Image (spheres, rainbow, N blue to C red):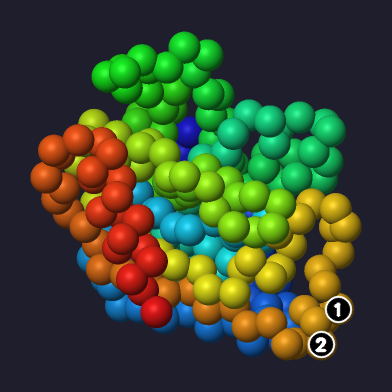
Amino acid sequence: MIKKDKILAFVQTIIYWVALGVFKIFFRFKAEGQENLKGLENSPVIFTSNHNSYLDGIFAVVSLPKISLWSKNFFPIRFLMTDRFFRWNHFPINLICKLIGAVKVTRAKNKKPDNSHLRQVLAEPIKLLKEGKKIWIYPEGGFHKDGTPKKPRVGAAFLHQQTKAPILPIRIIGNAKVMSKIVPFLPRITTLIGLNKIKVIIGKPIYYLENLSLEEDTSKIMQSIYKLK
């Protein structure tokens, strides 16, 4: 596992430096709130953000601070992705998933009213968090073809409930205009001439949710994300 983590950290560091330059030129990329990550370098963290683009994972990686050229800092981050993106009909997304060390999540066939099915569905990310790792989850699960979000799921709240790992709300602004559709795969012409701006805002960590219900806690998580401007 340690060797795999080092490989993933190395891969994500390469992606960081390559993507940072590209995004600065084409998206006028900007990240804010990195000071809110202070003290979380060596702790398990549940990163949560809105989701409107197939590039959100790379926007996420580039938004995190780097101390030096090869410093791991917050890497590797394990992104949770539904199992359908690991299939060959989603090429090249499936290769990217494997390259960045995404965690495959298979939806439960039989959902239970008490959400107990999530113990099996999220067994791997729960294990990773208890080992002190960092995961990134999109509570909305995905987005519609026009880039608008879907109804949020309760996975992030459940992970916090099971592990007590802090939740870090993050908002990505402008991503709905960049690759919110898988076909055509190329960005819009406005992206290529730098008319689209991408800004990532990192909020303050949430260390405690009231645990009234997973739905209510999820609502609070989403509010903390979308209040970031």
Residue 13 visible in rendering: no
Q: Amino acid at mark 2?
A: Ile
Q: Residue at 17% across / 54% down in the picture?
A: 207
Near mark 2 (Cα within 10 A), the count class, few <14, some 14-19 or many ≥20, is few
Quadrant showing the C terminus: bottom left
Nearer to the camera, 23 or 10: 23
Q: Which mark is residue 189?
A: 1
Q: Residue at 69% across / 70% down in the picture?
A: 177
Q: Residue at 85% across / 53% down in the picture?
A: 183
Q: Which mark is residue 68?
A: none
Nearer to the camera, 166 or 143: 143
Q: Is residue 195 left or right of residue 103?
A: right
Which quarter of the figure has residue 186?
bottom right
Q: Amino acid at mark 1?
A: Ile
Near mark 1 (Cα within 10 A), the count class, few <14, some 14-19 or many ≥20, is few
- Where does the image place residue 21, in percent across and percent down from the top left? 69, 81
Q: Is residue 168 left or right of residue 6?
A: left
Residue bearing the label numbered 2 = 193
Q: Are marks 1 and 2 in contact (CB under 8 Å)?
A: yes
